[in-house]
Image (cartoon, helix red, strand yellow):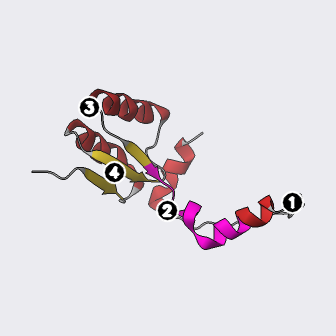
Amino acid sequence: KPGDACVIFTPDDTHFDMALEAIRRGIHVMITKPAVKTLAEHRQLYEEAKKKNVLVMIEVHKRFDSMYSDARDRIRDGLGEFSYFYSFMSQPKFQLSTFRSCK
């Protein structure tokens, strides 16, 4: 018997097919970001989940990371306006197509 829920934490281009299969089997799904490549895929997962009455959640692990929650709290406590912000993210080359398609 399958479990009640699954976590999809695999290469980006595998998320949609795996999530759709789980949903069709009536299994709740948690998917790491980015969930899927296109809005059409998002909509299809949404419609299938409604039909099967299962939950689909996008995993947002940084939301609970202490470094990010500290920054959020400082902003809420009146840090003030930003005049400069810098960020860097490294990503495997094979996953870049996902980011390019999210326009």
Vertical arrangement, residue 79 with respect to residue 35, above or below: below
> Of circles 1 and 2, which is in front?
1
Magenta span of residues: 58-71
Residue 15 numbered tag: none
Q: Which residue is mark 1?
A: 82
> Which labelled disc corresponds to residue 52?
3
Residue designated by label 4: 14
Instruction: State which mark lies toward you, 2 or 4.
Output: 4
Q: Position of residue 85 (x, y in %)?
A: 80, 63
Q: Residue placed farthest to the left in the image?
A: 1
x, y (%) of residue 30?
Answer: 37, 51
Q: Quadrant of residue 28?
A: top left
Identify the secondary structure beneath mark 1.
loop
- The answer to whether residue 12 is seen in the rendering is yes
Secondary structure under the numbered disc 3 in the rendered image: helix
Q: Name the residue carrying label 2.
A: 93
Q: Looking at numbered disc 2 in the image, what kind of residue is underneath it?
A: Lys
Q: Secondary structure at mark 2?
A: helix
From mark 3 to mark 1, how far is it between C-alphas? 45 Å
Q: Quadrant of the C terminus?
A: top right
Please determine whether, in this image, residue 18 is positioned above or below residue 66: above
Q: Amino acid at mark 4?
A: Thr
* Above or below, comparing residue 4 to residue 42 in the picture: below
Q: CA–CA distance between discs 1 and 2?
A: 31 Å
3 or 4: tag closer to the N-terminus: 4
Which residue is at 51% across, 56% downward? 60
